[in-house]
Amino acid sequence: MNKNAFRQLSYGVYVVSTWDKGRATGCTANSVMQITSDPATIAVSINHDNYTNQCIRDTGRFAVSILGEHSNPGIIGAFGFKSGRDNNKFDEVKSEVRSYLPIVSDACAYLVCELIDKMETSTHTVFLGKVLDADVLKKDDPMTYAYYHNVIKGKSPKNAPTYIAEEQPVQQSTPAAKYACSVCGYVYEGEVPFEELPDDYVCPICGQPKSVFVKK
Ligand SMILES: Cc1cc2nc3c(=O)[nH]c(=O)nc-3n(C[C@H](O)[C@H](O)[C@H](O)COP(=O)(O)O)c2cc1C
């Protein structure tokens, strides 16, 4: 099986939130999808080890804050790389309560759900939620998982369902174009395609800027 095929699936970037005995908590998730339109139903896949998993079971409700391209990327870090077991994640971001559930204010839309079913896999629970309330918070393009990786240059921790797929090196059908420094002749052969290197990349040999590189 070529796990690079999984990298062709598309996702968004969300904060899935709920209550922990009166305290707001939640985690970053990419695995949210709409299942039906009427009645409006969505599903989300949450790792067994994530504290959010236990809290959704206990509360029987959860919300999804849909992050936009202009949402503060720090939200993804605050909710995605530490646990609500020992952190008050909502202290770090502006939030509000909609239909009795905590949501992130700096999101482009939100959904509030009642837990109606769940399915266990070996590592994750798929929670099925009936949508009780939903609204658009601001005009923004929803952030895609690809945008998070390619533009924000973000990473995903091991509890993200996509983690293993991301660790596989991409096998390209055609080799990536090579670029050489026109000053010292150094040929760039790194894993990141040359076009995607940051603008402040400099030649490791002679220190000249990215702009002096030429395609071979
Ligand atoms: C971009 C991104 C996407 C993620 N997607 C998921 C996901 O779909 N499901 C999941 O269980 N964890 C996902 N995670 C990992 C959790 O957010 C992370 O393990 C978090 O620390 C769990 O917090 P908690 O213990 O408070 O629930 C993702 C993290 C990032 C950064």
Image (tube, rainbow, N blue to C red):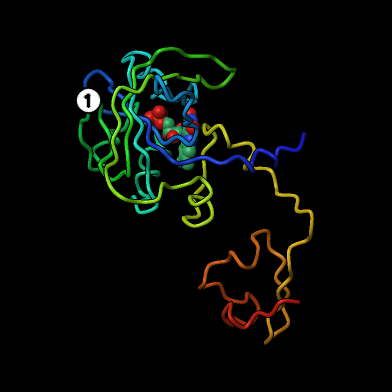
Q: Tag 1, which secondary structure?
A: loop
Which residue is located at x 31 percent, y 15 percent? 59
Callout 1, which amino acid? Answer: Ser
Q: Which residue is more in the foreground, 51 or 150?
A: 150
Q: Which residue is more in the foreground, 193 or 42?
A: 42
Residue at image mark 1: 99
Reply above or below: 19 against 210: above
Q: Which residue is more in the foreground, 143 or 151?
A: 143
- Which quadrant is home to the C terminus? bottom right
Reply above or below: 157 against 42: below
| Residue 151 placement (x, y as % from top left) | 49, 57
Which residue is located at x 54 percent, y 14 percent? 120
Quarter of the rendering containing residue 182: bottom right
| Residue 84 placement (x, y as % from top left) | 34, 29
- Which quadrant is home to the N terminus? top right
| Residue 103 placement (x, y as % from top left) | 27, 34
| Residue 22 placement (x, y as % from top left) | 21, 21
Single out the residue that lies furthest toward the bottom.
183
Quarter of the rendering containing residue 67: top left
Disc 1 within 8 angstroms of ligand 1 (CB):
no
Q: Is residue 97 left or right of residue 142?
A: left
Quarter of the rendering containing residue 20: top left
Single out the residue that lies furthest toward the front.
38
Which residue is located at x 75 percent, y 50 percent? 171
- Badge 1 crowding class, 10 Å Cα cut-off, few under 14, some 14 to 19, many 20 or more, is few
Reply above or below: 203 against 52: below
User: Number of callouts in the render?
Assistant: 1
Q: Is residue 187 left or right of residue 33?
A: right
